Amino acid sequence: MTERSVDVWFDFASPYSYLGTARVGALAAQRGVRLRWQPFLLGPIFADQGWSNSPLVLQSRKGEHAWRDLERQARKFGLPWRRPSRFPRPAVLPTRIALLGAEQPWCEAFTQAVFSRNFVADEEIDDAAAMAAVLERLGLPAQSLLDAALCPTERPRLRRQVDTARRLGIFGAPTWFVGDEMFWGNDRLEDALEWCRPVG
């Protein structure tokens, strides 16, 4: 195996994506692994399975366990955490912005800032004012990025990204790809990075 990059598929409404994306940067840097950010929406994927909402909402016992598990995991990794008062939060706008920056150096910082709003500050993420504040704090051209993200010609990009997730067989987030090898979940991050290590 000589692959030295990991595709990071994440959804801003996914709490386990928050944990995984908060951890992946430092761990990948330690191993010399390049990250390729792949923001997408899980909602259409869930709809394909006949689900009208997140399984953490539809399956109450699983959901309550997951919220407790998320508290434990955040404590384990030293990450701030607050269970959001609204779940899942709509995330179309930040996802479109992240797609615009997916190959830019600022994508990771933007991603972490949006996740922090959702799962630390318990604030909305799917409106222009919120995203302008995030972009401005990062020193990015907020208005031009918002204009681009909201442009009707940009909408197909997100649909294509979701279609790619479907073709890859993605069913949850975060999902990590090393070449064609898929790893699902925050708890499989280290396995994905380990898979990148060349043999010999």
Image: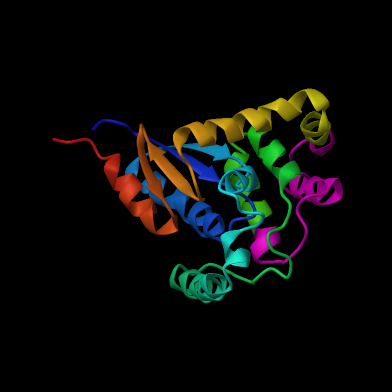
Q: Is residue 28 above or below residue 120?
A: above
Q: Which residues are magenta?
A: 116-143
Camera-side residue of 137 and 188: 188
The quadrant of the image that shows the N terminus is top left
Camera-side residue of 159 and 84: 159
On the image, the x and y values in percent for residue 156 come to 71, 26
Instruction: Tell me the quarter of the picture where residue 28 sits.
Output: top left
Residue depicted at x 74% and y 52%: 90
For residue 156, side relative to residue 69 (left or right): right
Q: Is residue 15 above or below residue 173?
A: below
Q: Does residue 104 appear in this view?
A: no
Residue depicted at x 34% and y 34%: 4
Q: Does residue 47 appear in this view?
A: yes
For residue 31, side relative to residue 86 (left or right): left
Residue 185 drawn in magenta: no
On the image, the x and y values in percent for residue 67 come to 56, 72
Instruction: Tell me the quarter of the picture where residue 151 sits.
Output: top right
User: In the rendered view, how is the structure colored?
Assistant: rainbow
Q: Is residue 166 above or below residue 157?
A: below
